[in-house]
Amino acid sequence: MDPHGQLDTPSATLSPLPPFLKRGLTAIVTLAFLSFVTSFGLFALLTYRLISWRRKSRKEHNQFVLLLYNLVLADIQQSIAFILNVAWVTRDGIVVGTPQCWAQGWFISTGDLASGIWIWAIGLHTFAAVVFNYRLPYRTFCISIAALWAFVYLCGVIGPVTHHDDYYVRAGAWCWVNEKYAVERLVLHYLWIFCAAFGTMIIYLGM
């Protein structure tokens, strides 16, 4: 049942799913599951290696490996977002107002942004190391990691807190930010992804 019956048709519950959309979502779920398995496998391997390294040596962790570790964590969140499409395939409908809809919107928002941010951070770190032979002090580096994650989740929290009832609704083939909140889409999501993508391109062209 759609508790948001006042929503415009593009944002309201869609049930039953058109056959082409059901097939498409099934394919997306399959690929998202493969992405999750491979990303989680790499995450587990890196976790094991980092713990083993820490036990055997008192040296600081390799900064590039830690950045890759965070990128994989972001990719896991992205894959979870699209695995949640299994709920729509099973229900034969994209149902607004459900926990699955809210969770999918949240994971898409944070996963996409985090992925862009960490790709940019890896590029910036590579540029500093290759061009200037410079690395941040380890403590500053760890604080920077925490600050980037805090920024990602702050962007993810502002929208739902400000517009709790109808922030995550159907956005085409899955749930994401309501199209009427175009400013929030731009300021809390697209702007930073575009900046990260453009910044990464400039960094690698510079090298």
Image (spheres, rainbow, N blue to C red):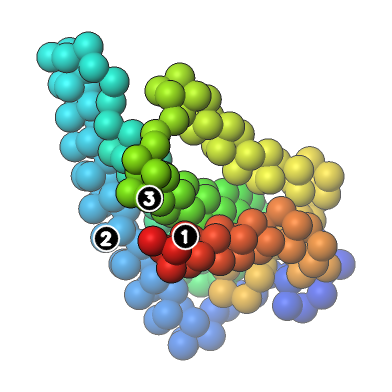
Q: Is residue 71 visible?
A: no
- Identify the amino acid type marked 3: Val
Q: Are marks 1 and 2 in contact (CB under 8 Å)?
A: no
Quadrant location of the N terminus? bottom right
Residue that appears at 58% across and 32% down: 147
Task: Tell me which label, 2 or 3, sits earlier in the chain.
Answer: 2
Image quadrant where residue 177 sits: bottom right
Disc number lying in front (2 or 3)? 3
Q: How far is mark 1 from mark 2, CA to CA?
A: 31 Å
Q: Position of residue 52 (x, y in %)?
A: 16, 21
Q: Amino acid at mark 1?
A: Ile
Q: Amino acid at mark 2?
A: Leu
Mark 2 = which residue? 34
- Residue 203's tag is 1
Q: Position of residue 190 (x, y in %)?
A: 66, 63
Mark before the other along the chain sequence, 1 or 2:
2
Q: Estimate the spatial distance between the alpha carbons at disc 3 and disc 1, rounded to whole Å.
A: 11 Å
Secondary structure type for disc 3 = helix
Task: Name the residue carrying label 3.
Answer: 131
| Mark 2 closeness class: few <14, some 14–19, many ≥20 residues within 10 Å | some
